[in-house]
Image (cartoon, helix red, strand yellow):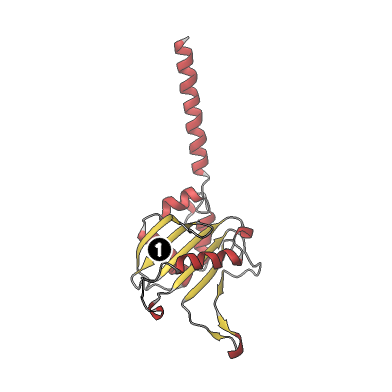
Amino acid sequence: MADEALHRSTLQDQLDLQDKLQRIAKMRMFDDTLMNAVFDSRISETEVLIQIILDRDDIKVTSTKTQEEFINVYGRMVTLDIVARDADHKLYNIEVQRDKYKAPPQRARFHAAVTDITLLKDRQPFKEMPERYTIFITEEDKFGSGLPLYHVENKIAELNDAPFCDGGHIIYVNGGYRNLATPIGQLMHDFACAHRQKIF
């Protein structure tokens, strides 16, 4: 009787392990668990991600953390997927979102506001505020125009849409973009890929 119970328990453990391994094998960087494993405290991986999205190779990331909580005593708190800083003190908040409808402009605005309040010390002059990038990588094309990136910048309407130059940047990345001749197309392919051997 005890041997039979032990056999059933061992068999169930093996089935549970197989189920877990199958789920792990299907994970992609659009899944929180794998995204956290790839980018949490991993500076070089986060640096490559930011360099490709911004099309710049001079960015040097100094810190990166995933699932960073920002407590708001006045209202809604938020957990940020990736928060990184570079050698020039610029801040990058990168959100990986499978559902494009969960990345509305108001959410980008909220994330920008939450991170902005961390950028200045008490009594530090406003003009010393470093740049901030709020980046949403959505699995589908958020705006439906087939572009790899959508840059959102503040402008002055009465001055022929001259840049406002407040240092705040919002970028939506089209996770469905697949021009494999471009770094951003390769990156989005890799985000959606569940087969390690097929990653660029």
The structure residue drawn at horizontal position 52% and vertical position 58%, both measured from the top left corner, is 96
Note whether 192 is above or below 21 in the view shown: below
Task: Name the side, left or right, on which 161 lies relative to 33.
Answer: right
Q: Percent position (x, y) of residue 61?
A: 36, 66
Q: State the residue in front, 110 or 162.
A: 110
Q: State the residue in front, 174 or 121.
A: 121
**Residue 37 shows in the view:** yes
Mark 1 neighbour density, 10 Å: few (under 14) some (14–19) many (20 or more): many
Q: Secondary structure at mark 1?
A: strand
Q: State the residue in front, 47 or 25.
A: 47
The structure residue drawn at horizontal position 48% and vertical position 38%, both measured from the top left corner, is 21
Task: Name the side, left or right, on which 139 lies relative to 119.
Answer: right
User: Residue placed farthest to the front in the image?
Assistant: 74
User: Residue placed farthest to the bottom in the image?
Assistant: 159
Q: Percent position (x, y) of residue 23?
A: 52, 41
Note whether 155 is above or below 61 in the view shown: below
The structure residue drawn at horizontal position 60% and vertical position 66%, both measured from the top left corner, is 106
**Residue 173 shows in the view:** no
The type of residue carrying mark 1 is Ala
